Image (cartoon, rainbow, N blue to C red):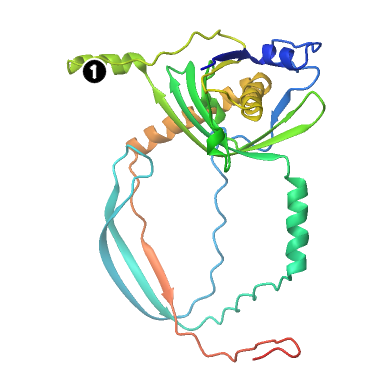
Amino acid sequence: MKNLILSTASFLALMVPQMTVRSSAQEEVTQGGNAEITGAIADGKPSPPAIPPVLPDFKVKSTVARELDVVEPPPMSGLPPVTGTITEMVHLVEDPKLPDPPPPPVVTDSEVSVVLAEAKKKYREARCLFLSATVYDHSRTLLRCYTSGNLRKEITAWSNLDFNYYSGFSNFKVKGAAEEIRAYNIMDMGVGNEDTAKWAKLTAKYGAKYKAPKIPSLPDGDPAYLIVSENPDEESVQIMEDLHQLYRNEGPRMKEAYLAREKAYAERYAYLLANPPVPEDVVIHFWKRQARPAVIERQEGEEP
């Protein structure tokens, strides 16, 4: 088995020996290797509230009300369920004569082919990534990665980065040394965190011994990784390199957004713990729909 340890700078130097690489995360790599997140990155700010629907002017004919004891799922993991008594109001109303929804558009096979061809042309360079990351003490990550439909080409590596920072966004792109663009979409990412000191203390409490992972020696500072997969193919190594190149260019922003999300999560958790939500009352409107003549348009020569 071959172990391969590379920093971003050393990898690029091997690929293009004459390339000048700067080590600062805030500086750009001058010839190829530029990486950036495409689209927004979540930073803990709440989404704008949904616009409430505009209800018709219902004419109530009769009403039935009852009280119900309900148990709803907790708003956040670790909080108690939402319980309470609600009032359910059921109104029988006159038919508000809402318009029928528009029929689905008729799309021909040729139109579908054109759309698919354009999408294939636009996204032909995109690679769908599936990542699994176990982060130890927020300083080292055991990372597994493969592209969609290519589980046999999974690559495993140890990284000196905290891959919690890779959450909050889905798309990024890297410009190669030959000006080619490699676009990526993180389709799925599972992140687990382990506190080795906490686990050692916990297992000792019960008379057991914690088996800490054998984390290889990796330098601090510039992104670096150790590939432990046997005979990794060139494309998989390139993906691993691009993931670390992304941190070189976007690391401060990724870390800042992650910390903002954690802060917002803690604040929201504390607020809900101090102010337990209560279930909301329910209002239901129903009516008997008046019969309407069916209008069916058929093409000339089409069977009814």
Q: Which residue is mark 1?
A: 203
Tell me the SS state at disc 1: helix
| As drawn, 18 above or below 287 | above
Direction from residue 198 to residue 146 in the image, left or right: right
Q: Is residue 259 visible?
A: no
The quarter of the picture where residue 149 lies is top right
Tell me if mark 1 has few (under 14), some (14-19) or many (20+) residues whose alpha carbon lies within 10 angstroms of its own.
few
Direction from residue 47 to residue 114 in the image, left or right: right
Which residue is pictured at 17% across the width and 15% down the height?
Answer: 207
Q: Is residue 94 visible?
A: yes
| As drawn, 21 above or below 262 | above
x and y percentages locating residue 122 in the rendered image: 76, 46
The quarter of the picture where the C terminus appears is bottom right
Which residue is pictured at 74% across the width and 71% down the height?
Answer: 108
The quarter of the picture where residue 165 lies is top right
Q: Nearer the viewer, residue 134 or 228?
A: 228
x and y percentages locating residue 242 in the rendered image: 66, 25
Which residue is pictured at 65% across the width and 39% down the height?
Answer: 127
Which residue is pictured at 52% across the width and 21% down the height?
Answer: 157
Q: Amino acid at mark 1?
A: Thr
| As drawn, 230 above or below 214 | below
Direction from residue 277 to residue 164 in the image, left or right: right
Direction from residue 44 to residue 198 in the image, left or right: left
x and y percentages locating residue 210 in the rendered image: 28, 16
- Count of labels in the image: 1
x and y percentages locating residue 32 in the rendered image: 78, 22
